[in-house]
Image: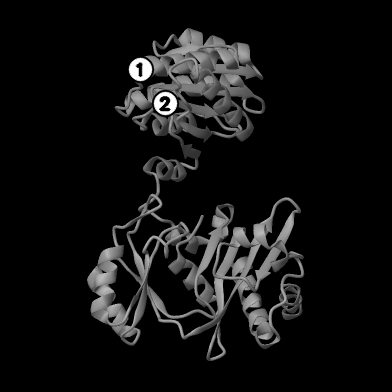
């Protein structure tokens, strides 16, 4: 889960990373009060989860409370790279900046470790630094058990060739940034820029944080950080039902058991769709190892709640969960939805293979539901689902 800048700033402050004061507001008039609390001057910063705010006009200085209101009026509602600005942060005006740096920690999946990155070339796109002057970006592996002590932080700072007069201050900031990374179960914490001011302070002026949602069970406070305005309502409903669902842009609803099978199903449906008006998968939905009537009903309810869906492809390979259990789940799910006043009106194509596949197919055939079509091959089922979706467009 990616956070807004103000949320990252709050987490930084919580763990001792040096930051400036600021507060988030969602009305222009609130910008006046916030600026007054900051001493009469402020920086008005659009809160969107995308870079390039400054170039888009989403970061403005305000010399007084009236100007803060005007700036907030201009920025609220602005579209920045497809993201609408619903909130702005009213931030304390920084002292004069002498130098800008870059520091971050992230999960290095390739090498199965954590990675610290630091550069004296901050305040710009770090990907550009990595591409044009890779020698200016230090990359230092971090042992997960040992973590980042002040000695380790000094090693990182030395490899990045920070000037001697800021080295200790940056090292101290990197220790507190590591504390944030670990304590909040983050996948990424980044400060860009980390600045040295003319009065000698080291400050984190802008930051990014991405949290590991797999750790939500031990981070109950993270639920409050979710962006409810941007959340897709279907994805939110699926999450509430403990379903692994991602909304896509197509017309064929997908239900499968196991992430690998579901991803393969997306591919075969997209390929089949090329012959049927270029229809595409409408979602990713993995029901996992259990296919009870309730789980199947929840999955169908989510998918059929998507007005873009014209047909549904249920693709299951029986393993621990046998195909007869899945078939019974489908039949019972259709009855369950009907009893709730949510009778299925869109065609379902079902492909069952693996453990007890023949018995599962017989259960579906005996049920003889008018909207359920049984196709026994994956390619054939994908083609039929795409054909039905195209016919309903």
Precedes in sequence: disc 2 or disc 1 = 2
In the picture, measured across the screen, residue 71 lies left or right of residue 7, that is: left
Looking at the image, residue 216 lies above or below residue 237: below
- Residue under circle 2? 251
- x, y percent for residue 50: 46, 57
Tell me which residue sits at (28%, 75%) in the image: 68
Task: Work out whether 11 lies above or below 239.
Answer: below
Query: To which quarter of the image does residue 261 belong?
Result: top right
Q: Position of residue 221 (x, y in %)?
A: 48, 64
Q: Is 212 situated left or right of 368 in this image?
A: right
**How far across and how far down the image is residue 390, in percent?**
40, 17
Q: Name the residue: 42% across, 65% down.
A: 54
Q: Residue at x 65, y 81 (%)?
A: 172
Question: In the image, is 173 to the left or to the right of 74?
Answer: right
What is the total number of numbered labels drawn onto the structure image? 2
Q: Quadrant of residue 162?
A: bottom right
Task: Using the numbered discs, state the Cα–Cα distance from disc 2 to disc 1 in whole angstroms.
Answer: 9 Å
Label 1 sits on a secondary structure element that is helix
Is residue 59 depicted above or below 319 in this figure? below
- Residue at the extreme front of the image, as rendered: 132
* Residue matched to label 1: 392
Q: Which mark is residue 257?
A: none
Q: Nearer the viewer, residue 73 or 212?
A: 73
**Closer to us: 282 or 184:** 282
Please identify the quadrant where the C terminus is shown.
top left
């Amino acid at each position: 889960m990616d956070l807004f800048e103000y949320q990252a700033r709050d987490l930084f402050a919580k763990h001792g990373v040096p930051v400036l004061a600021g507060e988030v507001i969602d009305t222009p008039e609130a910008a006046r009060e916030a600026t007054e609390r900051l001493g009469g001057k402020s920086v008005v910063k659009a809160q969107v989860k995308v870079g390039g705010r400054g170039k888009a006009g989403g970061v403005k200085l305000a010399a007084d409370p009236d100007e803060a209101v005007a700036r907030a009026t201009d920025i609220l509602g602005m579209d920045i790279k497809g993201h609408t600005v619903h909130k702005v942060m009213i931030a304390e005006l920084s002292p004069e900046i002498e130098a800008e740096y870059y520091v971050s920690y992230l999960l290095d999946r390739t090498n199965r470790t954590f990675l610290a990155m630091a550069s004296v070339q901050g305040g710009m796109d770090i990907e550009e630094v990595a591409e044009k002057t890779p020698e200016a970006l230090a990359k230092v592996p971090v042992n997960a058990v040992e973590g980042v002590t002040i000695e380790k932080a000094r090693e990182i700072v030395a490899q990045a060739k920070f000037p001697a007069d800021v080295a200790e201050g940056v090292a101290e900031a990197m220790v507190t940034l590591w504390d944030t990374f670990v304590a909040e179960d983050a996948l990424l914490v980044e400060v860009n820029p980390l600045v040295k001011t003319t009065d000698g302070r080291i400050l984190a002026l802008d930051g990014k944080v991405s949290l590991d949602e797999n750790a939500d069970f031990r981070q109950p406070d993270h639920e409050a950080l979710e962006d409810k305005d941007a959340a897709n309502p279907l994805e939110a409903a699926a999450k509430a039902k403990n379903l692994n669902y991602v909304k896509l842009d197509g017309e064929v609803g997908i239900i499968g058991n196991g992430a690998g099978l579901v991803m393969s199903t997306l591919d075969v449906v997209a390929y089949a769709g090329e012959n049927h008006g270029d229809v595409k998968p409408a979602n990713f939905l993995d029901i996992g190892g259990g296919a009870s009537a309730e789980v199947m009903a929840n999955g169908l309810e989510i998918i059929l709640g998507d007005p873009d869906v014209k047909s549904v492809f249920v693709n299951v390979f029986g393993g621990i969960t046998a195909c007869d259990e899945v078939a019974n789940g489908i039949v019972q799910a259709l009855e369950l939805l009907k009893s709730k006043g949510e009778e299925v009106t869109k065609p379902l194509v079902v492909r069952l293979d693996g453990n007890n596949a023949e018995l599962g197919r017989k259960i579906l055939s005996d049920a003889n539901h008018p909207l359920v079509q049984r196709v026994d091959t994956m390619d054939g089922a994908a083609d039929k689902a795409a054909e039905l979706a195209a016919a309903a467009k």
